[in-house]
Image (cartoon, grey):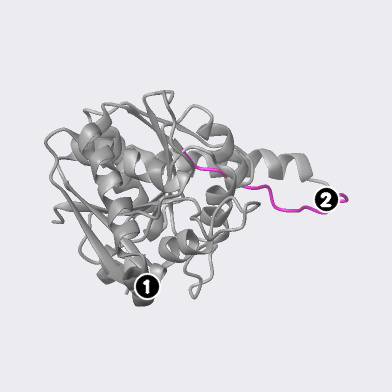
Amino acid sequence: MSTHIVVGVDGSVPATGAVEWAAADARRRGLDLRLVHVGPQWLHEANAEHCARLLEEAADRARALAGDVKVTTELLSGNVAGELIRESATAGGVVLGSRGLGGFAGMTVGSVSLAVAGHASGPVVVVRAPAAAPAQHGRVVVGYDGSRDAQAAMEYAVEQARARGARLHVVSAWQMPVFSPYAVTYNSLIEDLMREETGAARERVVPWREANPDLVITDEQPCAHPVTALMHAAGSADLVVVGSRGRSGFASAVLGSVSHGVLHHVTCPVAVVRPDAEDRS
């Protein structure tokens, strides 16, 4: 069991949001907080005082929000994504701003966040920006299709909902296949497919509800693209959780189209979760 959460700090507005989110999460889950700033060695040597100040300011902010949580800091040298991925191996999660100071202004999610979300060993939470008084909906949303990645996402979503005292809402979206317009039994096929898909999706949630009687778990099975369905559900969510890739993903893909789309289009914090290495084998 990991005892800490890692947060990437670079002085950007989204990174400040990540520090604030992680501080609250560490307090709720009883974990320590490790703040890291990564840069090339030459940058640290030339701007050691500036880098140290960034970390100390972030640590002060975290301590003000996290109460008795242990907060530590460290300057690291190397490739930013690579170092954060390495940090994830021993962490209970990595929290990042959606894009850093080096990102393009028009990008909603930067290359570092996407790389870490696709390769980290555990949950990666991407936060857009801090909010002075964030709305609290008391609901965690998770995308679930029964895949191994979705199983890991559900486990994390259950943990988050329990720590928050929140409801857990399970979204199992499905899409209608293309039928020939000349098919005589077209309407009947649609009705049968709807019953089959929604029934199977509801059944997949039953074991989670039985295993977690202390949680209020609701579910829906919209006929829509998963990204669209999760975007809609995210409007009243404190956190959206997805697996790194689902049943329809290519085995070689580290970040599927759904998790990629959710990261780019959902504005509340998003957690991307991969199964443990032994579960992926």
Mark number for residue 82? 1
135, above or below 206, in the image: above
Could you tell me the amino acid type at mark 1? Gly
Q: Disc 1 on helix, strand or loop?
A: helix
Closest to the observer: 112 or 269?
112
User: Counting other residues with Cα less than 10 Å from the Cα at mark 2, is it few (<14), some (14-19), or many (20 or more)?
Assistant: few
Could you say which quadrant of the image residue 93 lies in?
bottom left
Is residue 272 shown to the viewer in this render? yes
Q: Nearer the viewer, residue 36 or 241?
A: 36
Label located before the other in sequence (2 or 1): 1
The three-letter code of the residue at mark 2 reads Ala
Q: Give the left or right position of residue 171, taking residue 10 as reference.
A: right
Residue shown at the point (53%, 70%) measured from the top left = 250
Q: Residue 174, can we see it?
A: no
Q: Main secondary structure of the magenta part?
A: loop
Magenta segment: 171-183
Q: In the figure, 104 relative to 81: above or below?
A: above
Q: Residue 98 location, x and y as percent?
A: 49, 50
Q: Tag 2, which secondary structure?
A: loop
Disc on res. 44:
none
Position in image of residue 278 (x %, y %) = 25, 71
The mark found on residue 183 in the picture is 2
